[in-house]
Image (tube, helix red, strand yellow):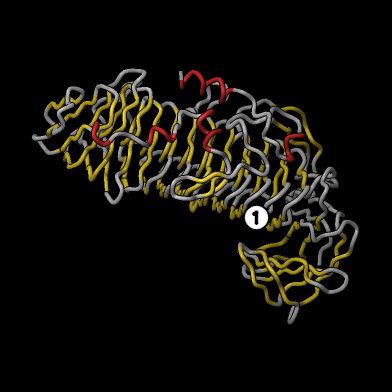
């Protein structure tokens, strides 16, 4: 009944998500059904803090921590060897060795060690069976297809034995390329869990690295994936709980892509470390992408984070993108239009449709370095906590912030730097004030930009990472209606570009009044005071 229960749980609307931006127009994001703004902190066996409890995960995914414990005496030991693989356990009826193909046909725990230079491990168990495969120094390569395939099971668990190194490498061309044929080095038609504290190297030379056609939970492990196309895919959902995952992919890095089933196609990063270098999107969800804890780094991508709904409640995310850094977009219909370019508005130069897309940040640290738009929502966006730092574009055709609807800022810290041509500022519903700074000309990378109050106290210091012509800044230190003086130069001690500054040696540039925004009027237009 686990799969049936999961379907209805995940399909339900996330009515308890509790983030500040949930009041904006559009449907509530679907995914984990009990994420709150404060989060319920739990921890895994390794002690990594998590923002979504394991009990909640058990309700909304196939994951069950009990599946990671078993009776060692019941293990079936399989030694892999070219032309000589053997089953050494007396309980061996469920393992069939045919040349260099090893097939597991029933529920149980199977410990694999040794290597196959041209072989395959197949799980072909019953639809109610939970199959646990322990990789204990196992290395499998295939010259004709995938080296590890789960054809059928209720759930497959790949457990990486502590202190061991394991490897899976597929062919560069598959003999079987039919519709339902495997296309990844580790391929599962059933729910898949990867756990354990050992290491696994996955080389997806044909297409994908790791692909689960149902749900995917990465519970732990040290895993490196190289893929000719996508790195790691969970069709219904893709969850990272713990461990260290390094992905290098010519296509997308880490994603969930179910577009057909309601409530599916979501990604949750709930702990651990994820490092992605992607030729296309770094981390992508068809429905909702949530970062709740852990350390997420997109080192290289076209678009860094992409989903219909993007939620950050905690953790650290660092995103580098050739195009948009964070992009809330997808296939939903629009819910109206917004006249941009006014007070508390958005991009100048006409009307943009406001779709059912959201970016919501309530905690954590989000740092973006983008050549296109920095934080981009084709609908609305809200920031109620945490820190958002955007090192946006240098060209005036894009903006550090690009929100078709309204950007509501009610808390946290926002520093969005970039070109001056397409500036978005906090909207009229924002409970927290801010300032808009438009420099007369771009300042070079490494320039200190400081904001001081009427008493001369520095309330914010920002160090540019690239040529910058504008800065939108909002924090609790900015008081609505108060005048602030802008300086360039001086010294600063910063983390992620933000920190404390000193005005010694700084040059005064002019003054701004908190809450008085003048958004740009299109490419080259500029807005706000210019010095």
Residue 488 x, y percent position in the rendering: 73, 72
**Quarter of the rendering occupied by the C terminus:** bottom right
Q: Is residue 303 visible?
A: no
Quadrant of the image occupied by residue 145? top left
On screen, residue 163 versus residue 252, left or right, reads left
Quadrant of the image occupied by residue 437? bottom right
Look at 73% across and 60% down and name the residue there.
470
Q: Nearer the viewer, residue 352 or 142?
A: 142
Say which element carries label 1: strand
Q: Is residue 430 visible?
A: yes
Residue 291 x, y percent position in the rendering: 57, 43
Residue 418 x, y percent position in the rendering: 68, 57
Look at 58% across and 23% down and name the residue there.
11
| Mark 1, other Cα within 10 Å: few <14 / some 14–19 / many ≥20 | many
Residue 241 x, y percent position in the rendering: 48, 42
Q: Which residue is mark 1?
A: 390
Q: Residue furthest bottom?
A: 505
Q: Nearer the viewer, residue 468 or 184?
A: 184
Look at 42% across and 50% down and name the residue there.
244
Q: Nearer the viewer, residue 322 or 395?
A: 322
Relative to 4, residue 77 above or below? below
On screen, residue 238 versus residue 14, left or right, reads left
């Amino acid at each position: 009944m686990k799969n049936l229960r999961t379907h209805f749980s995940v399909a339900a609307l996330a009515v308890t998500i509790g983030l500040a931006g949930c009041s904006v127009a559009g449907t509530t994001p679907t995914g984990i059904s009990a994420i709150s703004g404060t989060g319920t902190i739990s921890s895994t066996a390794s002690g990594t803090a998590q923002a979504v409890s394991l009990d909640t995960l058990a309700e909304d995914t196939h994951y069950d921590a009990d599946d990671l414990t078993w009776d060692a005496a019941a293990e079936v030991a399989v030694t892999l060897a070219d032309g000589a693989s053997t089953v050494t356990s007396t309980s061996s009826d469920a393992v069939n060795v045919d040349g260099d193909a090893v097939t597991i046909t029933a529920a149980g725990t199977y410990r694999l060690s040794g290597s196959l230079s041209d072989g395959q491990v197949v799980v072909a168990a019953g639809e109610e069976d939970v199959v646990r495969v322990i990789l204990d120094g196992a290395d499998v390569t295939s010259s004709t297809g995938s080296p590890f395939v789960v054809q059928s099971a209720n759930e497959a668990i790949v457990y990486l034995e502590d202190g061991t190194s394991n490897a899976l490498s597929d062919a560069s061309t598959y003999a079987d390329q039919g519709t339902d044929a495997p296309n990844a080095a580790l391929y599962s038609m059933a729910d898949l869990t990867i756990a354990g504290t050992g290491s696994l190297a996955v080389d997806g030379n044909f297409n994908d690295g790791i692909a689960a056609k149902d749900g995917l939970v990465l519970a732990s492990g040290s895993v490196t994936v190289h893929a000719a196309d996508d790195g790691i895919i969970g069709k219904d959902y893709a969850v990272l709980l713990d461990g260290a995952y390094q992905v290098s992919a010519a296509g997308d890095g880490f994603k969930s892509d179910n577009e057909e089933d309601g409530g599916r196609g979501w990604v949750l990063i709930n702990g651990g470390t994820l490092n992605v270098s992607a030729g296309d999107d770094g981390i992508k969800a068809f429905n909702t992408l949530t970062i709740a804890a852990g350390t997420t780094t997109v080192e290289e991508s076209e678009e860094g984070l992409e989903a219909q709904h993007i939620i950050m409640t905690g953790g650290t995310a660092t995103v580098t993108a050739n195009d948009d850094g964070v992009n809330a977009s997808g296939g939903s219909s629009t819910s109206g239009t917004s006249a941009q370019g006014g007070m508390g508005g958005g991009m100048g130069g006409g009307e943009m449709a406001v779709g059912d897309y959201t970016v919501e940040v309530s905690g954590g640290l989000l740092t973006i370095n983008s050549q296109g738009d920095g934080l981009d929502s084709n609908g609305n966006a809200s920031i109620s906590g945490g820190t958002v730092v955007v090192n946006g574009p240098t060209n005036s055709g894009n903006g550090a912030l690009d929100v078709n609807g309204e950007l509501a800022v009610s808390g946290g810290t926002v520093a969005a730097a970039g070109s001056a041509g397409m500036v978005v500022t906090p909207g009229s519903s924002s409970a927290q004030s801010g300032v808009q700074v438009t420099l007369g000309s771009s300042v070079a990378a490494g320039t200190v930009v400081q904001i001081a109050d009427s008493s001369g106290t520095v309330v914010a210091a920002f160090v540019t990472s690239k040529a910058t012509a504008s800065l939108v800044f909002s924090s609790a230190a900015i008081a609505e209606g108060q005048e602030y003086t802008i300086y360039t130069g001086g010294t600063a001690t910063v983390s992620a570009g933000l920190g404390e500054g000193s005005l010694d040696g700084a040059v005064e540039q002019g003054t701004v009044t908190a809450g008085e925004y003048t958004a740009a009027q299109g490419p080259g237009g500029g807005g706000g005071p210019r010095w």
